[in-house]
Image: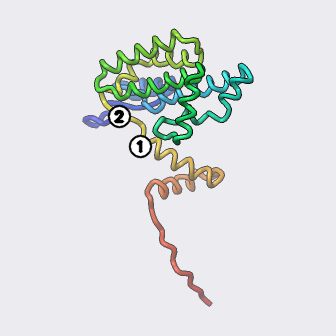
Amino acid sequence: VLFRSGAVAVVTCDLSPAFAKGISEHLPNAERVADRFHVVQLATRQLDRVRAAEAKESKEKRALLSRTKYIWLKNEESLTEKQAERKRSLAKEHLKTARACAMKEALQAVYDCGTRAEAESELDALCSWIMHSNIPQMKTVAKTIRENKAEILNYFDHRVTNAVLEGMNSVIQSAKRLARGFSNLEYFKTVIYLKLGKLHFPQLPACATH
């Protein structure tokens, strides 16, 4: 969220209709920016559905796609040499999963654009490609992009994301899982302050009393 002269000027959020409604009602003067992580996550989720569906089409495809989930979901630079080689090999098999992966990577590449106009051109080309494919799961991504195009392109005007908040939420949820949940909200709030404040409490030597 960016603040200008005491008022909220820009809000980053996911593509949830509930968020859009809340922002329009409570922050009517704020410009909404679709968070880039959540936009790419849409494509990533649908990509995995393509893989799961294609693996059920035949024994051959099931064998090809066996244990490949993270090969498609990880970014190229995060793959091991062995994973990258297998991905290149599978790309030659004319799999829908490979094409869906290329679409996801093309969406990620849009965020390397330097201007809003350049990004708009790339998004339009990507959506056209997806809609002319025979991959229905990815077509839902293109439809969502078109419906939220303005909010997605607003990123190129402001270059803000939810990265810091997502990181904080990850720490909070980790603490909640370790404690198997919190029945007392005040305890939970205290743990959040301790975790996010990165406070360190050195262990004191034990002392005995009579």
**Quadrant position of residue 5:** top left
Identify residue type, mark 1.
Val
Query: Within 10 Å of the Cα at label 1, are there few (<14), some (14-19), or many (20+) other Cα atoms?
Result: few
- Would residue 163 be found to the left or right of residue 134 on screen? left
Q: Is residue 39 left or right of residue 96?
A: left
Q: Whole-percent x and y of residue 99?
A: 54, 20
**Residue 56: mark in rendering:** none
Q: Residue at x 59, y 23 (%)?
A: 97
Q: Nearer the viewer, residue 160 or 103?
A: 103
SS class, disc 2: loop
Q: Is label 1 in a helix, a strand or a loop?
A: helix
- Quarter of the image with the C terminus is bottom right
Quadrant into which the N terminus falls: top left
Q: Quadrant of residue 110?
A: top left
Q: Above or below — where is 186 with respect to 37? A: below
Residue on which the image places disc 1: 164
Q: Residue at x 47, y 23 (%)?
A: 21
Residue furthest to the left in view is 5
Farthest right residue? 59
Q: Who's the residue at 51% across and 23% down the image?
A: 17
- As drawn, is 5 to the left or to the right of 26? left
- Any part of residue 7 in sight: yes
Does residue 58 appear left or right of residue 175 in this picture?
A: right
Q: Is residue 30 visible?
A: no
Three-letter code, disc 2: Val
For the residues labelled 2 and 1, the Cα–Cα distance comes to 10 Å
Residue 28: x %, y % from top left: 37, 24
